Image (spheres, rainbow, N blue to C red):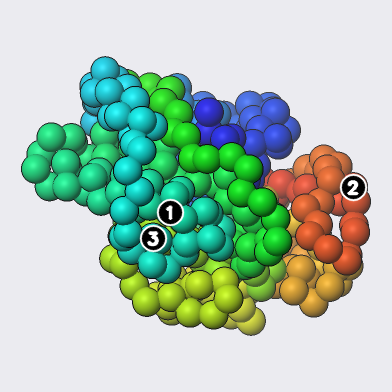
Amino acid sequence: MINNRRYLGNKYKLLPFITKVINEECGKIESVADIFAGTGAVASAFTNKTIITNDLMYSNFICNLAWFSPQSYDPKLIIDYIVYYNAISNFDDNYMTKKFADTYFSYNDCSKIGFIREDIERNYKLKKINERERAILLTSLLYAMDKIAKTCGHYDAYRKGVEFTSTIELSVLLAKIENRLENKCFNKDANELVRDISVDLVYIDPPYNSRQYCDAYHLLENVARWEKPEVYGVARKMNRDNIKSKYCTKDATNVFEDLIKNIKSKYIVFSYNNMSNKGNDRSNAKISDEDIMRILKNKGDVKIFSESYKAFSAGKSNIQNNAERLFLCTCFSEVK
Ligand SMILES: C[S@@+](CC[C@H](N)C(=O)[O-])C[C@H]1O[C@@H](n2cnc3c(N)ncnc32)[C@H](O)[C@@H]1O
């Protein structure tokens, strides 16, 4: 299942709200681009249309490729690999044991993760599995890691002094074998991507505060990339300079304005939380409502919809029942 992952800002639970607004307010739509796709939850609600997904993080790109790539795959091959991986009982040293043993995972689970990751790459290079099969196996590994990691849902720290209770077990992903041949998955900065695509609807769900996703999910990104970098500090993070998002900085308003200006679509649907000045500093929204309205109104007619939900809250600020807002912009000029 696509919601088999804990992910900050995951919109899975909001899909009924998002699809209702789109179905009721937008005309005929044949193609949808989810350009800050994260887990791919929103794209998954549009599999009867042509889907474009994109995310700055390679780990998310891999998950989106697993779910939406037009390339077909052999389900029997996937099952055979998963059965083989789950039966591993030799625990040798590797990159994962050296850098992460007894932190987020036990020594044995690190050994297994390192072995499986290496094996997937080897079989891909030997052409025993295709790009989609590689992505599906990798996604199964990332989901399985996320299920047992000794964290509070993100990898800014691991929980010390807590027993390792469960061991890693991969599940078979139930991804559609034949997706639409026009589907495309990207791993780019959204501002670059929109310059190259033209679709009926663009869904925008950027980070809204200063929490960088590459900080929260560095370990999944590290394993997905498998460049075996040096890691630092208690949280054992790798260098993440090239995957920091400008949407988490004081440049957020400018990059948002640039993004909207360069979009070529009939509709833009934009999710943005209203935590502005309500939580602690780190959770304050980076783009003000005034700027959002000014920028969107330059592009088309704007309507706002809202639905109440419980905010993710790790620690002190305990803000409940925030309204999740959806801005719908019907663009002035159809550049298509
Ligand atoms: C709020 S999350 C999206 C959640 C997603 N809608 C879901 O349901 O899982 C924001 C995502 O934007 C990605 N991101 C941040 N800056 C980006 C950029 N400049 N271009 C593309 N993706 C970016 C992050 O990696 C993160 O996955």
| Residue 272 x/y as whole percent | 70, 56
Q: Which mark is residue 215?
A: none
Q: Residue furthest left?
A: 126
Residue position for label 2: 321
| Crowdedness near tag 1: few (<14), some (14–19) or many (≥20) residues, C-alpha within 10 Å | many
Residue position for label 3: 96
Q: In which quarter of the image is ligand 1?
A: bottom right
- Using the image, determine if residue 260 lies above or below residue 281: above
Would residue 245 be found to the left or right of residue 116 on screen? right
Q: Which mark is residue 110?
A: 1
* Measured Cα–Cα span from mark 2 to mark 3: 40 Å
Q: Which residue is drawn at 88% across and 65% down?
A: 317
- Using the image, determine if residue 214 lies above or below residue 313: below
Q: Does the residue labelled 2 lie within 8 Å of ligand 1?
A: no
| Crowdedness near tag 2: few (<14), some (14–19) or many (≥20) residues, C-alpha within 10 Å | few
Would residue 273 be found to the left or right of residue 263 on screen? right
Residue 170 visible at all = yes
Label 1 element class: helix
Using the image as rendered, state which of residue 244 and residue 107 is in the foreground.
107
